[in-house]
Image (spheres, rainbow, N blue to C red):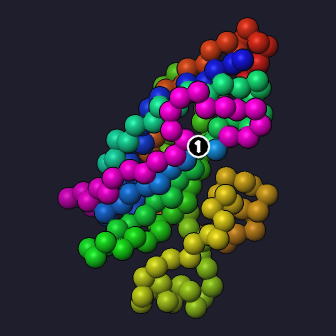
């Protein structure tokens, strides 16, 4: 079977309206993909930068997959949150990106978005805080339902990933 090793880090985020950000992340696969080693999901620490322009997490990613084919290639999905001074967490954006199919080092900027909600929800958000959230977060990486959403762009999550492919040619798997 072919093997894919993903090594890298979630560097941080930029373009969000406030600082004190953290990120929940996960890797989604479909089909005949199995994890040999590593974690498929996690959470970064809260970073409260002094310059208020970019949050730095440098959160490690190290996952080793095995597969019989490329169908269901791994995707990374993110939920970026803001933590206020009282410790309350407010969703600032969802995002996802495909893990590259070519070996080597890749720098990726993953755009994030937030559901815009109804007019009443947006007015409520301005005065009380909080944001519209998805009932089913799986919609983030499944395109069949995502196109129906009305969204607003928020910021970007920055990644650096190293991809190692092994035994793809031996088993006739082509990317």
Above or below residue 93? Residue 6 is: above
Q: From which residue to which does the magenta span run?
A: 29-54
Q: Does the magenta run of residues contain 41?
A: yes
Residue 27 in percent (x, y) is at 58, 43
Res 132 seen here = yes
Residue wearing tag 1: 27
Q: For the residue carrying disc 1, how many other residues have a C-alpha within 10 Å: few (<14), some (14-19), or many (20+)?
A: some
Residue 131 in percent (x, y) is at 50, 77
Quarter occupied by residue 35: top right
* Identity of the residue drawn at 55% across and 41% down: 40
Res 160 seen here = no
Give the main secondary structure, helix, strand or loop, of the magenta stretch: loop
* Identity of the residue drawn at 76% across and 62% down: 145
Residue 24 shown left or right of residue 146 in the figure: left
Which image quarter holds the N terminus?
A: top right
Residue 32 shown left or right of residue 23 in the figure: right
Quarter occupied by residue 74: top right
Residue located farthest toward the top when viewing the structure as drawn: 170
SS class of the residue under badge 1? strand
Residue 71 in percent (x, y) is at 78, 34
* Identity of the residue drawn at 76% across and 32% down: 32
Which image quarter holds the C terminus?
A: top right
Residue toward you, 98 or 88: 88
């Amino acid at each position: 079977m072919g093997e894919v090793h993903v090594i890298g880090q979630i560097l941080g985020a930029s373009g969000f309206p406030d600082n004190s950000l953290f990120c929940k992340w996960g890797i989604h696969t479909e089909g005949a993909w199995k994890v040999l080693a590593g974690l498929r999901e996690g959470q970064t620490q809260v970073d409260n930068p002094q310059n208020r322009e970019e949050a730095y997490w440098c959160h490690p990613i190290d996952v080793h997959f095995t597969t019989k084919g490329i169908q269901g290639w791994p995707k990374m999905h993110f939920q970026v949150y803001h933590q206020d001074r009282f410790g309350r967490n407010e969703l600032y954006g969802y995002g996802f990106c495909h893990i590259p199919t070519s070996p080597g080092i890749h720098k990726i900027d993953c755009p994030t978005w937030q559901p815009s909600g109804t007019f009443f929800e947006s007015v409520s958000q301005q005065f009380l805080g909080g944001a519209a959230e998805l009932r089913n977060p799986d919609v983030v990486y499944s395109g069949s339902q995502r196109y129906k959403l009305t969204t607003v762009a928020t910021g970007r999550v920055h990644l650096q990933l190293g991809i190692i492919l092994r035994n793809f040619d031996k088993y006739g798997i082509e990317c």
